[in-house]
Amino acid sequence: MAIPTVDFLERPLVDKKMVWDFNEHRYVALVDGVLKDAYVNLVIDWKTKENAQSYLDLVSRVVNETILSFKDEKYKNAMLYYIGHSKKMRLEIQKVLYDTVWYNRRDGGFMMAYNSGANLNQGKMIEFGIDKAISSIARQIIKNSPLGTRYMTVDINEKQIFASLTTLLAYLVSQGYITSTQSDVVADSEDLNDLPYTEDYQLVELENDRYLFTNIKSIKSYVEDMWIYDNVNGTW
Amino acid sequence: MSLTIPTQGLNTYYTMDGLNTINLNLLDPLGYFANYAITIESPVFETLLESLGDEPNFTLPDFLLWCPTFQDFFQDEENSSLYNLLVAFLNIAKIKVKWTLIQDEKTWKRLVALYIGHYMELNIRAIKDEENRLSLVAGTPQAKETRHLEYEVGNEVFKDMRATIYGSQFWFEYEPYGRFLSGFWGTSIL
């Protein structure tokens, strides 16, 4: 995997503070977590726990879309995957969600972003825009983390370094990229150009006869491997 | 002495260098009519390529030494999103910045690092794509004033290198070396 092992989550982590929405691919804060860590009792504000949870779901959507607004659409899938599988990003999202809960209790609030008005005297529309969806502190939290980068510094593609040509070829054969006959040809010639033409991976030779293998179709396989809700059985 | 004298090995050369010379000697009745091979036994020095050896290993720390602003991008080493690009640029840099020409390890490493830094900066600009030029999503339309086309005959390479802070440093250092590679101030090699 390309997300460093210390930071990697096999599946988005669901605990008492946050759950993962598998349909929209985003974390949603839970009422109890907000009470414990953000010191806000939303049940008082929204009368029931269900109401408060629905409100947090909307907050999550606004925060998620605001984060994605820092990026171009072409990097969206990689970013969503990173948010779902990184411990660091989970913590950052949690901070932003809690901050937004505070912000909504003050003068601002994400509902401000939906407000607009027409000044009939001047004939102008007044729109608050996405700037008002989260607080200035939350925006800074995002900018201080990879959430606010336009292009991610961590490569989502699966990568692996091989210490010798033999181990590399053994891996390619075991993964079904090449046949053992093709492997023998390259082992004899010691020339990577003898590998068959492929559009599945990138292979670069590093210093000291090491080889870096990159699966450039990782995102595609992640999407195929994703949990999808089964309507018949009611399972993921 | 002609530079085309026939040689054998590192330390032997022949006094006559072609059929014409032999024929002329045949016509000369008092000539030597002999083709001498002169071998220098000592001192025999190693060739330049042997004394230089292979180019030194260039590693990620070498790059970050001269281009520290990229440090954050390579925190996860090969897992970093730009690592493959770095290796690709390194392979090209080794061809462009010839080790046999620079001959000094520290200078060579600095030049390779600056060369990569220059193109890395340009590529990051392209990847960020803040103007949404390469996006299918509608973005801010470009103002007409920014569409500017200019032709210039002359030192185009220098103009390209001046586009980034690393490029201008590279060219300042490399320009004297580049002159030795071709008769055109190194312009044909970049």
Image (spheres, coloured by chain):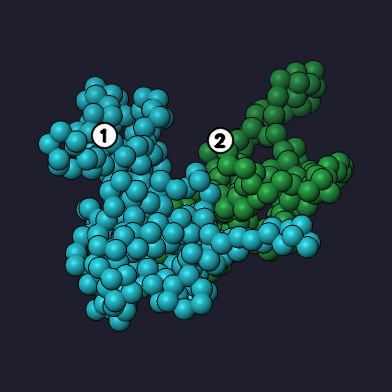
Q: Secondary structure at mark 2?
A: strand
User: Which picture quadrant has residue B137?
Assistant: top right
Q: Please name the color used to draw chain A.
A: cyan
Image position of B113 with respect to A190: above or below: below
- Residue B20 x/y as whole percent: 76, 21
Residue under the image location 56 percent in, 62 percent down: A115
Between residues A209 and A137, which one lies in front from this camera angle?
A: A137
In the rendered structure, are the residues bearing label 1 and label 2 in contact, judged by CB atoms less than 8 Å apart? no
Between residues B112 and A134, which one lies in front from this camera angle?
A: A134
Residue under the image location 68 percent in, 45 percent down: B190
Q: Secondary structure at mark 1?
A: helix
Q: Please name the color used to draw chain B.
A: green
Image position of A197 with respect to B113: above or below: above
- Tell me which chain the residue with mark 1 is part of: A
- Residue A181 x/y as whole percent: 24, 22
- Residue A18 x/y as whole percent: 26, 64
Q: Amino acid at mark 2?
A: Gln
Residue highlighted by disc 2 = B8
Q: Is residue B108 left or right of residue A102?
A: right
